[in-house]
Amino acid sequence: MPHTEREQMTVATTPSLVDVPEGTTISTLLADRVARAGDRTLIERRAATDGSWVPVSAGEFQADVLTVARGLVAQGIAAGDRVAIMSRTRYEWTLLDFAAWAVGAVVVPVYETSSPDQVRWILADSGARLVVVETPAHADAVRQVRDDLPDLEDVLVIATGALDDLRETAASVPARDVAARRDAVRRDDLATIVYTSGSTGRPKGAELTHGNFAHLAMNARLALPELLEADGARTVLFLPLAHVFARLIQVAVIASGSVLGHLPDVKTLTHDLRTFRPTFLLAVPRVFEKVYNSAEQRAGSRARRRVFGWAARVSGEYSRALDGGAVPAGLRARHALADRFVLAQLRAAMGGNLRYAISGGAPLGDRLGHFFRGAGLTVLEGYGLTETTAPTAVNLPSDLRIGTVGPPFPGTSVRVDDDGAVLVSGPHLFRGYRGRPDLTAEAVVDGWFRTGDVGALDHGHLRITGRTKEIIVTAGGKNVAPAPLEDRVRAHPLVSQVVVVGDKRPFIGALITLDAEMLPGWLATQGIPPMSVGAARTDPRVLAALDAAVEEANTAVSRAESIRKFRVLDGDFTEANEYLTPSLKVKRDLVLRDFAEDVDALYAR
């Protein structure tokens, strides 16, 4: 990979590895895959009968895409029309995505957990003509707001045979009509409108082009060959395809030599990893925290937990030694023992073939990054936003610096101004917010997108320290970025979510929620009788464990930045109660508003 250029350590640029021709679209990426290996497996689908994985070749998938595309034309979909998809991550999502692109339509993702009010806003703002939903319950959410959607003409339901219906009506549309529509699409045409998760207000529709996706997918093949082009490369998606991160990986896999699978339900993730046996994964930090904490609890007795803790420490030490270029013989011997008794079982639980993972959406943290690399799974932390079509920086197997989000992605420039604000430019930038030229002009100045994040460049690698709007300024004038503290406290298996507070207050405090899934196992390992979350939040033994977790987190910051007091809330932050976005980010403003009394209680004398 070309060397990253630097300018006074405030700008880092990585040149493109390949430029995108004007006639390239997402559809041509699929056509190229078919031309290279049309008879080889592209996707594996879960069989409804026995749950086995059934191969679908690249040629078979393209044929299915073109058939469904003809059905969309029969449905009346014209080039430029908006087609919304509201579904869990499954084969049909990818199929509809590519079918809509083949006829020049614009896809509008809707999270399957969205409320009727959220559905109303996205469908109305985008002007969607057609909505394809997964279940009758999703269709009902649309029906509740149908009177407010004058552009909407039809709602199709996957669970009741919508895809088969489209395939049947395809016979009325000549294949050459779809081919002509597909060939008329160009690189700079609109491909999708992805609505921001709304953690800071009403979601905005980011308009992304075919060229945005093609640039990232084509460059990813060359920048990440260890993942996308390795022999037997395969990944299974379980993050929502409504999120741009998963969507980009979907396109990159189809443009490369990898095999793609879909998991609609993460409750069966462990079993599905064992049967699909991926070589790389896409996940958010919370998934890695859960894997670690679950493995620790499964260790069982106190003695076995001590062995796990020892193995985890050795794994981290081994990874850090790799950064130094040489691993001492004694550490190699201890690592071999840790691998035999603990780490190998962890790899087996994740399918046995997993070697890489891409993490984004929130900070991963040094502790987990080094642990997993030492255990044989290299987590490549990256960074991006909806407006950058996901990745704008990512660590590479050949250029890894744990604790950073990596160097700029090929074709990307990253700039950090005097205030620490992170700005980005490159061919992966969105073309604007739908219907909001004022917001677009505010966000993009002279070709540089203001991300809203604060960070620094570390030898050409970007380090994100927080969000501009989330920086806390205490009454004493100390600026505190909450994310690093929250990450360290959340490492404890009892903790689900953490919101650090203290703006204009005399010290830093925190609101903590308990992890209802992990609580029973933790209590059992401590020899404590079962209890509810409501009882646990005031139990002295639970509070003592949380206090130890907070004190451990405080060792990484100064006294002025440390958490002095915390309060355990009754309940958790979830998508259902709308305190979490679908990408699992806490809606901080909403939490601070609704739990203002709990915040005030932290500072009561």
Image (spheres, grey):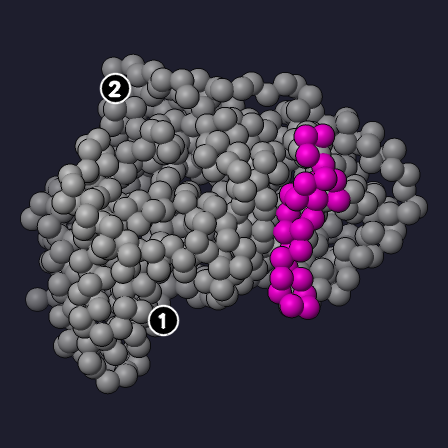
Amino acid marked by disc 1:
Glu
Quadrant housing the C terminus = bottom left
Residue that badge 2 annotates: 9
Query: Viewer-nearest of labels 2 and 1?
Result: 1
Q: Is residue 383 above or below residue 52?
A: above
Q: Is residue 250 magenta?
A: no
User: x and y percent of residue 297 in the render?
Assistant: 28, 68
Quadrant housing the N terminus = top left
Residue visible at 67% across and 51% down? 55
Q: Is residue 42 magenta?
A: yes
Q: Secondary structure at mark 2?
A: loop
Does the image show residue 71? yes
User: x and y percent of residue 253 in the render?
Assistant: 57, 39
User: x and y percent of residue 580 in the render?
Assistant: 41, 58
- In the rendered view, does 119 fall on the left or right side of 173? left
Q: Secondary structure at mark 1?
A: loop
Q: Which residues are magenta?
A: 35-60
- In the rendered view, does 221 fall on the left or right side of 514? right
Sequence order check, earlier mark of 2 and 1? 2
Residue that badge 1 annotates: 517
- In the rendered view, does 304 fall on the left or right side of 179? left
Nearest the eye: 207 or 103 = 103
